[in-house]
Image: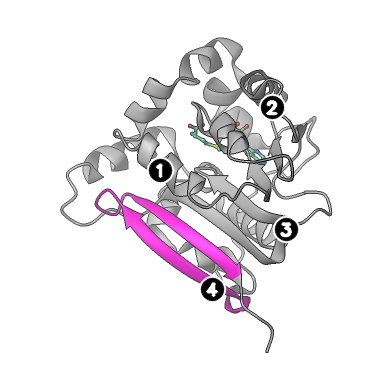
Amino acid sequence: MAIPSSSNTATISSVSALPTYMHEVYEWAYLNPRNVGILDNEIVVSTILWGNYKRLKQVVLDEIKPNMSVLQVAHVYGSLIPEMARCLNEDGKFELIDISPLQITVADKKLGNLPNVTTRIADATNLNDEHHDLVNCFFLLHEIPDDYKRRVVDTLLSKIKPDGTLIIVDYHKPHRLNPVKPIMRFIFHWFEPFAKELWEHDIQDYATNPDQYSWHKETIFGGLYQKLIVKRKPET
Ligand SMILES: C[S@@+](CC[C@H](N)C(=O)[O-])C[C@H]1O[C@@H](n2cnc3c(N)ncnc32)[C@H](O)[C@@H]1O
């Protein structure tokens, strides 16, 4: 069942004017150069993810074949981005988009001179006409308001090739007895105001036409994280 549009008023705007949530909630994490230098670190990310970064990265890397055209939706701190690009051969293509110019600069440094790599500033709700074998969305959805989630999910689904794959890795409602659940509830309350929505909704409910796709979900670490593999159903 698709989630009906709410009155959430996230400002969808041009890239030069970032969405309001980027300034109001995530300025410190993604727009402040000093903090970015501290946060973009394997140990920091691994700590934030309760030691699961390596495992969650592998979930993505396992989906990449060397000749694929891969779209990475938003920069990710730590080593995931260059590791993804290194999986590709000369027939493969890696494109990364991010809404923040600073994040693109940081990604460019990490990607160095790797071949067949492009990066550009773009909003995940407003991408170009290209279609990809693999689209990866890693811990972006929990950081954006519900209306934005819906637009991003629809946009990403529209960017996979007919036999392509969308992979989404993000938070999920932990099992009742997961000991980190109360801590995550506290963190979400104070720092991640849009994350708890992923405890309340299946990601496929954000899609306008979920029935056109197959959705395969696996949960990780007592249900706290989810890996979602989405493919277009063959037309009948
Ligand atoms: C992928 S998410 C969270 C990743 C995770 N917290 C990490 O370790 O980096 C963070 C990125 O999403 C970007 N972002 C936020 N909203 C976006 C949007 N609408 N379109 C594209 N990028 C966006 C931010 O600029 C930031 O670089």
Mark 1 lies on residue = 56
In the image, residue 24 sits, relative to residue 228, either above or below, namely: above
Left or right, 177 with reference to 187? left
Mark 2 lies on residue = 114
Q: Examine the structure image and report whether residue 197 is included in the region drawn in magenta.
A: no
Going from the N terminus, do you reach mark 2 or mark 4 first? 2
**How many marks overall?**
4
Q: Amino acid at mark 2?
A: Leu
Tell me the distance, in whole angstroms, between the alpha carbons under discs 3 and 2. 24 Å
Mark 4 lies on residue = 214
In the image, residue 193 sits, relative to residue 233, either above or below, namely: above
Q: Amino acid at mark 1?
A: Leu
Any part of residue 148 in sight: no
Tell me the distance, in whole angstroms, between the alpha carbons under discs 4 and 3. 15 Å
* Residue 37 location (% of width, % of height): 53, 13
Q: Cβ(mark 1) to ligand 1 < 8 Å?
A: no
Q: Amino acid at mark 3?
A: Lys
Span of residues in magenta: 211-231
